[in-house]
Amino acid sequence: MNALIIANGDHPSDDLLCSLIPAHPLVILTDGAANRFAGRLPTAYVIGDFDSIDKSILSSVPAELRIPVFDQEQCDLEKAIQFAISSKATSISIVGAGGGRLDAIRHRRRRKRRAD
């Protein structure tokens, strides 16, 4: 199964999304990306600590599609990747991961390596 993760960085174009959705039966939004896409992708899972999502949008997401993960040692993109893997995804496409947030991922990875 193919998974598509939409992160809360630079948003992908509508054309790109329209071309990707049919090939990806599992769609996962990080909580911040849900602000823009939850209403347009009603079967998408929303994952994260829900600190970046508008509360009215969160309440419109069915409970079975909300995946709360409050681990502050991981960014929401990492949480989404782990969820895709645990959902038996055989491939994962990620869009919207740009926009200056890679520094947070690098920082956490460095900190994790030092702990190991």
Image (cartoon, rainbow, N blue to C red):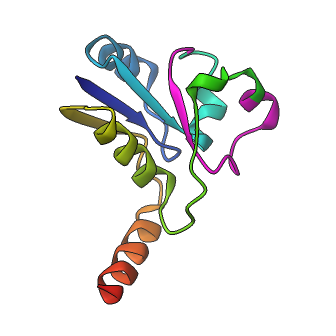
- Image-based side of 37 in relation to 14, left or right: right
Q: Position of residue 4 (x, y in %)?
A: 34, 30
Residue 90 in percent (x, y) is at: 18, 32
Q: Is residue 44 above or below residue 82?
A: above
Residue beneath the point at 74% across and 28% down: 57
- Name the image quarter holding residue 19: top left
Residue 114 position (above or below residue 97):
below
Quadrant hosting residue 56: top right
User: Is residue 46 at all visible to an observer of this figure?
Assistant: yes
Residue in the image at 39% along x and 41% along y:
83
**Quadrant (top left/top right/bottom left/bottom right) for the N terminus:** top left
> Residue drawn 66% across and 33% down?
35
Nearest the viewer among 113 and 94 is 113
**Count of number-bearing discs:** 0
Q: Residue furthest top?
A: 22
Q: Is residue 33 above or below residue 1?
A: below
Q: Position of residue 101 (x, y in %)?
A: 48, 61
Q: Which quadrant holds the C terminus?
A: bottom left
**Which image quadrant for residue 96?**
top left
Tell me the residue at 42%/44% (across/down).
Answer: 80
Q: Magenta stretch: residue 54 in it?
A: yes
Q: Name, please, the residue furthest toward the right.
A: 56
> Which portion, as a residue range, is magenta?
42-58
Within the magenta stretch, is there residue 86? no
Q: Is residue 98 visible?
A: no
> Where does residue 13 sit, x and y in percent of width and height?
44, 26
Q: Is residue 54 above or below residue 63?
A: below
